[in-house]
Amino acid sequence: MPSKEFHEKLIAKMQEQMGELMTPDEMRPIIAEAVQKAFFERRIELDQWRSIRTDLPPIFVEMMTQRLNEAVNAQVDAYLVANPTVLQDAVTKVIEEGLMSVVVRVFESRTSSALFTLGEALAKSQRELMQRGLLNP
């Protein structure tokens, strides 16, 4: 839950704007419910035509996820700066493996058409030989 200080500031701001319509004791449960809904309940977002719904996590979860991602990224960056060969070795490995797979794919694409044509020619020759009786099935 947000801090007590936050609640008190919110109450003070509302009193300043609303005067004495409500006492702090009357405002407390309303503010607690509003904070609960605003920060901790799942949200639904509609597109501009209000037809496609997107179910979103609570704002609190989104904020925590962002902060954790920033912290993890900072730690990963620090690790990679302290250990540059780890990244260099991984990049080299990916490039070598990737290069080999590219060579294989190019070879396959260049030869597949020729091999298909050869297979068709052999099958045709086989059928012709079988029709002439020169080859048994």
Image (cartoon, helix red, strand yellow):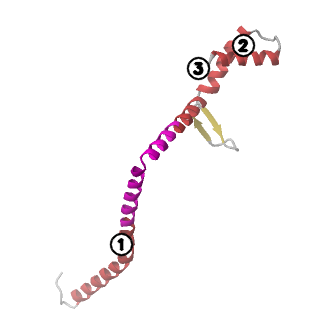
Depth check: give the residue in front, 31 or 7. Answer: 7
Q: Is residue 81 magenta?
A: yes
Depth check: give the residue in front, 75 or 11. Answer: 75
Instruction: Name which residue lies at 61% across and 21% down.
Output: 2
Report the magenta residues as a range. 71-100
Residue 90 percent across, percent down from the top left: 39, 54
Q: Which residue is mark 3?
A: 1
Q: Mark 1 or mark 3: which is in front?
A: 3
Residue 20 percent across, percent down from the top left: 82, 10
Q: Which residue is mark 1?
A: 108
Q: Is residue 21 magenta?
A: no
Q: Main secondary structure of the magenta part?
A: helix
Image quarter of residue 101: bottom left
118 relative to 88, above or below: below
Q: Quick check: 2 left or right of 122?
A: right
Q: Amino acid at mark 1?
A: Glu
